Image: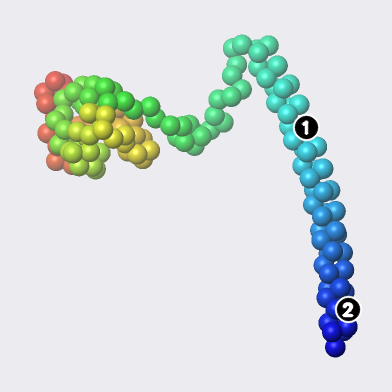
Amino acid sequence: MANIQQLLNEEIRRLARKEVISVEKELKSQLVELRKTVSELKNRIKTLEKNQTSAPGKTMLEPANAEDDKLKSVRVTPERIIAWRTKLGLKRAGYAKLLDVSPLSVSHWESGKTVPREAQKRRIAELRDMGKRELKILCQAKGVKLNKSADE
């Protein structure tokens, strides 16, 4: 009986090795193809970079559409948050209400204790880029009172 068990184990090992070798060959061929693709892409990037340096007025690295532009990170610092809030003539509570956050969050952002999340940064940028009329309508909808300096 031990001899049959030993034969079965050897046969299983042989078949497993054969299977591993066939899978390994396939993976190696895929690896070769991927390396060729990477090499071609590197060469393409080099030529594009050369073309860009030869044409200084055009930038090829700009986002292709508006969606890519929206995905860009918004730079927000405590000083900028304070400047934008005071430019709008809002208190922390009113500014927080427009951003749908707590006044404590705005306080922490302005003191530098915390940093706004990406969605909140985008909302801050939207408020910053709004026109006076749009801002006035938004404030009325949210029940926020604007100071006269921002209202004019």
Residue matched to label 2: 7
Between 124 and 113, the residue placed more toward the observer is 113
Residue at screen point 47% across, 36% down: 71
Q: Is residue 3 visible?
A: yes
Q: Quadrant of the C terminus?
A: top left
The residue labelled by disc 1 is 40
Q: Is residue 112 left or right of residue 37?
A: left
Which one is nearer the viewer's eye here, 44 or 111?
111
Q: Secondary structure at mark 1?
A: helix
Q: Amino acid at mark 2?
A: Leu
Q: Residue furthest front?
A: 2
Given residues 23 and 3, the one toward you in this image is 3
Residue 63 shown left or right of residue 116 in the figure: right
Residue drawn at (38%, 38%), measured in percent from left and top? 118
Q: Look at label 1 and name its amino acid.
A: Glu
Earlier-in-chain disc, 1 versus 2? 2
Rounded to the nearest angstrom, the CA distance separating label 1 from label 2 is 50 Å
The answer to whether residue 62 is left or right of residue 109 is right
